[in-house]
Image: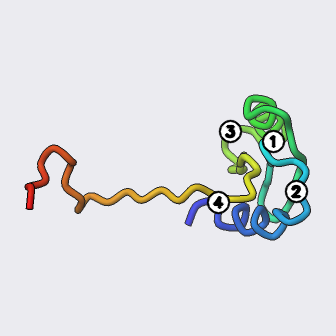
Amino acid sequence: MALEKELTVYKQKLPELKGQEGKFALIHGDDFIDTFGSYEDAMKEGYSKFGVNDPFLVKQIQAIEQVQFISRFVEPCELRRSV
């Protein structure tokens, strides 16, 4: 899976980042680089350090992740039949 190492590093580091919720973490491979106040700043630093061909992760720090469920097997609401 793409960015699997980086996501693992994020999850391991999350307890230490409690006071920085809302900021953006920059992670490359097994290395936690830094946190940034905006997504744009984190992306600029990532491209500056690693270029466009070396993957890195920019993730907003959140204590509770929102669960998103997407399935191609769920009918759109307007197509559901009344019971």
Which corner quadrant of the image does residue 81 belong to?
bottom left
Q: Nearer the viewer, mark 4 or mark 1?
A: 1
Whole-percent x and y of residue 53?
67, 44
**Which residue is found at the position 75% from the left and 58% from the top?**
63
Q: Is residue 17 left or right of residue 77?
A: right
Q: Secondary structure at mark 1?
A: loop
Q: Evaluate if marks 3 and 4 touch, with contact meaning CB atoms under 8 Å apart.
A: no
Q: Evaluate if marks 2 and 3 touch, with contact meaning CB atoms under 8 Å apart.
A: no
Q: CA distance from mark 3 to mark 1?
A: 22 Å
Q: Secondary structure at mark 4?
A: loop
- Going from N to C along the chain, the mark reached first, 3 or 4, is 4
Amino acid type for the residue under numbered disc 1:
Lys
**Disc 4: which residue:** 3
Amino acid type for the residue under numbered disc 2:
Leu
**Disc 1: which residue:** 23
Q: Is residue 76 left or right of residue 21?
A: left
Q: Which mark is residue 17?
A: 2
Whole-percent x and y of residue 69?
42, 59
Amino acid type for the residue under numbered disc 4:
Leu
Q: Evaluate if marks 1 and 2 touch, with contact meaning CB atoms under 8 Å apart.
A: yes
